[in-house]
Amino acid sequence: MREELFDPQKYWESYFNNIDLDSKETQELKHAAILESFCSEYLKAGSPVLDLGCGGGRNTIYLAKRGYEIYGIDLSNAAVDLCKKRLKKQGLLGDFKQGTFNNIPYPDDFCDAVICIASLDHVSFQTAQESITEIRRILSTGGVVLLTFDPLETDEDRMHEAEVLPDGTLKFVCGKQKGMLFRRYRDEEIRQLLVDQDVISFKRSAGGARIIIYR
């Protein structure tokens, strides 16, 4: 059974449509901690950076405040709208588009860096492979990628709410996450995805997330 039949976009549209722009929870969203060292070690001032799976904008806001040229892609139109509103409210600039990770709506050699924070977890292995190829296409020569995957044990207590697809991807069929796709990547699967990339570091956070930087 193919992933396209499930239309996970519906789940994410509903998810982001229910986020209150002015709520305390939204205002206090924190950026991924790894961004701080990633920016200081690998990014030049003003570099164009693409946030693949920008979601509610927690990471794009951090980058925009530090003067980077910000672009964002998300499957959800509601997420794109939320990012635009949040940056505008803070007087920040950014370009956001609705799109898929395996068909990024930007030209070749477009940006110097791509961040993809816990986003490829939500597509099938095949789509993740296609997405890595797309990231390579839009990345400039010498560009760098920050890629993270959630801990392998994520959603362990909700496995009964999910159907396991032939490739191992979870499709949630009931509960609060109904309609969401999630793949619990093993380290060897991540390395398989990145077999043709120049991996600089592959680390595991204290909480079990996998953090990869590659060129």
Image (tube, rainbow, N blue to C red):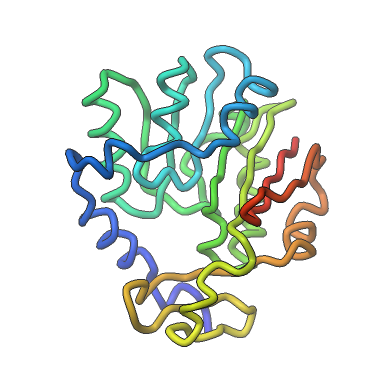
Determine whether, in the image, residue 140 is placed left or right of residue 102: right
The answer to which image quadrant residue 179 occupies is bottom left
Determine whether, in the image, residue 37 is placed left or right of residue 121: right
Determine whether, in the image, residue 190 is placed left or right of residue 62: right
Which residue is nearer to you in this view: 179 or 154? Answer: 154
Can you name the residue that lies furthest to the front here? Answer: 206
Q: Residue sitting at 43 percent across and 84 percent down?
A: 161
Q: Residue sitting at 62 percent across and 61 percent down?
A: 151
| Rendered view: 149 above or below 137 | below
The answer to which image quadrant residue 62 occupies is top left
Can you name the residue that lies furthest to the top here? Answer: 45
| Rendered view: 9 above or below 75 | below
Query: Quick one: quadrant of the C terminus?
Result: top right
Q: Position of residue 88 (x, y in %)?
A: 24, 25
Which residue is nearer to you in this view: 104 or 171? Answer: 171
Q: Position of residue 19 (x, y in %)?
A: 23, 51
Q: Position of residue 207 (x, y in %)?
A: 62, 54
Q: Residue sitting at 71 percent across and 44 percent down?
A: 212
The answer to which image quadrant residue 200 occupies is top right
Q: Residue sitting at 79 percent across and 61 percent down?
A: 192
| Rendered view: 6 above or below 44 | below
Q: Report how many numbered discs are placed on residues in the image.
A: 0
